[in-house]
Structures are given as structure tokens and as C-alpha cells.
Image (cartoon, grey):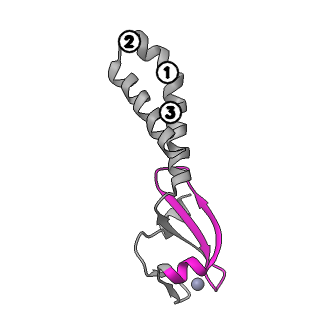
């Protein structure tokens, strides 16, 4: 992941070591290798014409945002009984807010 991250850039034009560079429109026409949505940030990987794989940070799609919220909600829900025992009402309110946010995205 480190090697890929070091290639990432949030700013177009995206330059390749081969000398070609891409704006957002020409980037979108390159062959999509994949997207990594394991984190809040999403890395989009595309192959340059020279076959090198480049990466840029992109905004998560609605589906990716929903998946992230669902993972957080799943983790928090597991701890819900502990929160209730501890009388942690702000944590319980956060769970309720997340449930509402996920429902709105569905
Ligand atoms: Zn290239």
C-alpha cells in the first residue's frame, strides 16, 4: 500500500514517469485497474498508456460512503451493551445518528 500511496495525488494533471500527463477527463478514459476503499480516502488506480499503474485520491462514491458507515455502525453496535451499561448516552446517540445516516443513504 505504501508504494501505491506514494504515487497518489489529489491534483490533476496527473503525470506519469513516461512523460505523459492526464487531466480529469483524460484520466477517466484510461483503463481502470480498481479502486481501494478500505479507508476514508479512496484510491483509484488506472493504467497509463505506457502500462504503468498510476493512482489518484478520489472522492468516495455514495455506495463506498455507505459501506464505510455500515462498517462503523457494525463495530459500534457490537459495543452497544457496554455503552448502555456504562450509561454512555452520547455514544448511544452516535449509534442512533449513524443508523439514521445509513438509512438515508440506502
Ligand atoms: Zn506512463
Residue bearing the label numbered 3: 73
- Provide the secondary structure element on which disc 1 rests: loop
Q: Residue at x 56, y 45 (%)?
A: 67
First in sequence, mark 1 or 3: give its number: 3
Question: Could you tell me how far apart the alpha carbons at marks 1 and 3 are, in whole angstroms?
Answer: 10 Å
**Image quadrant containing the N terminus:** bottom right
The quadrant of the rendered image in which ligand 1 is seen is: bottom right
Give me the residue at 52% from left, 44% from top.
Answer: 68
In this view, the residue in front, 102 or 73, is 102
Residues 98 and 85: in front is: 98
Instruction: Look at the image and say whether residue 69 sits in the magenta stretch.
Output: no
| Disc 3 residue: CB within 8 Å of ligand 1 | no
Marks counted in the figure total: 3
Residue that badge 1 annotates: 79
Quadrant showing the C terminus: top right
Secondary structure beneath dot 2 equals: helix
| Mark 1 or mark 2: whose residue is earlier in sequence | 1
The x and y percentages for residue 101 are 44, 39
Write the start and end of the magenta stretch as one range. Answer: 25-52
Q: Position of residue 14 (x, y in %)?
A: 47, 79
* Residue 33 sits above or below residue 41 on the image: below
The residue at 44%/70% (across/down) is 9
Residue 16 appears anywhere in the view: no
Q: Is the residue 83 above or below the residue 99 in the image?
A: above
For residue 102, above or below residue 37: above
The disc at residue 86 is 2
How much space separates mark 3 and mark 2, taking CA atoms? 19 Å
Circles 3, 2 touching at the beta carbon (< 8 Å): no
Query: Earlier along the polypeptide chain: callout 3 or callout 2?
Result: 3
Foreground: disc 3 or disc 2 = 3
Residue 18 image-quadrant placement = bottom right
Amino acid at each position: 500500500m505504501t508504494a501505491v500511496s506514494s504515487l497518489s495525488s489529489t491534483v490533476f494533471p496527473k503525470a506519469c514517469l513516461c512523460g505523459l500527463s492526464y487531466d480529469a477527463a483524460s484520466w477517466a478514459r484510461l483503463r481502470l485497474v480498481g479502486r481501494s476503499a478500505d479507508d476514508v480516502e479512496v484510491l483509484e488506480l488506472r493504467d497509463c498508456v505506457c502500462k504503468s499503474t498510476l493512482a489518484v485520491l478520489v472522492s468516495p462514491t455514495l455506495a463506498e460512503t455507505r459501506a464505510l458507515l455500515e462498517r462503523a455502525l457494525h463495530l459500534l453496535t457490537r459495543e452497544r451493551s457496554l455503552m448502555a451499561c456504562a450509561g454512555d448516552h452520547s455514544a448511544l446517540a452516535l449509534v442512533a445518528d449513524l443508523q439514521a445516516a445509513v438509512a438515508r443513504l440506502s
